[in-house]
Image (spheres, coloured by chain):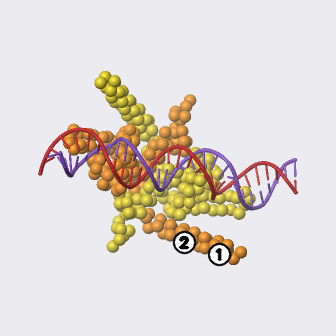
Chain colours: A orange, B yellow, C red, D purple
DNA sequence: AGACAAAGGTATCTATTGGATACCGATAGC
DNA sequence: GCTATCGGTATCCAATAGATACCTTTGTCT
């Protein structure tokens, strides 16, 4: 009985679901998938839409997404070359969960910014206090 | 009229929602939030439950989550010290979107593993072909 | 008194990853 | 020939993650 036969569990570092979960959360992968939600996009367009990623990193991202079966890569024999990336059905099935997260992020911007300001102010105060204390010794 | 006044948009690199979106997708942050879904957990327990993170990285993760107002940190004046981390209401509001993603990941493990195998096999074949070609020259 | 243990970290160093930049190969148009 | 386009690679440097050792406080054990 091997680990891989157990039910998938993200908290088990040996479970593939964990790697997959973290791949989805990848800095660029999730953005790429959402951009591809409207249909196939070519490499250079993708680079523009997902502001701002270097070609090396975008290529890496696309390769792993392709390997995982979330997108397909189609090369057209033209010059200059044309390469389209598009979601597979499995890739499309990720759109809904991802858009929920996206909506969450977009709607909580103000609250989070406030929380940050409050935290940073508190930190500044604490720092000021300890410095003063230091000077008073 | 500044960028920060525009509607939140993850695809805009200057929009805070993007940073927030990527923070959620952070390798450890999302796992921590899900673990805290069942109630407060202390540092060492968290380390065990979120297998396997180094103390430095866990501390960093917890600090940013605290700064963003997603968790609170409570210190009990005991020896040895006890520090509890728990979700704020905003943190709790992330549980549902995250669990969707988690379910997606856990349920698609087999399909993705197959896709990987297929991709790697295709790569091996292509490599073998080019090598053979190389030898035949 | 001295040694040791527990919890929640921090400090330091190294390995891995991400990013900036330059360049390549094929071909069409000038 | 020279230049531009597209989809990348190659190379190098900076930022991040990870491994490991160590610190602090106080209670307990000997």
Position in image of residue B54 (x %, y %): 59, 49
Q: Chain of mark 1?
A: A
Of A16 and B137, the residue lying toward us: B137
Q: Earlier in the sequence, mark 1 or mark 2?
A: 2
Q: Chain of mark 2?
A: A
The residues bearing labels 1 and 2 have C-alpha atoms spaced at a distance of 16 Å
Q: Is residue A123 left or right of residue A71?
A: right
Seen at 65% across and 75% down, the residue is A132
Of B134 and A6, the residue lying toward us: B134
Of A55 and C6, the residue lying toward us: A55
Of B41 and B93, the residue lying toward us: B41
Q: Which mark is residue A121?
A: 2
Q: In the displayed orientation, state which residue is furthest to the bottom.
A: A136
Q: Is residue B58 left or right of residue C24?
A: right
Q: Is residue B45 left or right of residue D24?
A: left
Residue that badge 1 annotates:
A132
Asked whether the viewer can see residue B103, the reply is no
Position in image of residue A91 (x %, y %): 36, 44
């Amino acid at each position: 009985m091997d680990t891989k036969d157990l039910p998938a569990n993200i908290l088990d570092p040996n479970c593939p679901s964990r790697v997959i979960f973290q791949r989805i959360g990848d800095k660029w992968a999730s953005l790429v998938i959402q951009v591809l939600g409207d249909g196939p996009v070519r490499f250079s367009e993708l680079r523009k839409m997902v502001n701002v990623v270097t070609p090396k990193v975008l290529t890496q991202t696309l390769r792993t997404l392709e390997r995982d079966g979330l997108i397909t890569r189609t090369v057209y024999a033209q010059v200059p070359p044309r390469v389209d990336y598009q979601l597979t059905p499995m890739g499309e099935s990720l759109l809904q969960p991802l858009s929920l997260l996206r909506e969450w992020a977009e709607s909580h911007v103000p609250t989070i910014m406030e929380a940050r300001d409050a935290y940073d102010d508190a930190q500044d105060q604490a720092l000021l206090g300890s410095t003063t204390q230091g000077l008073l010794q």
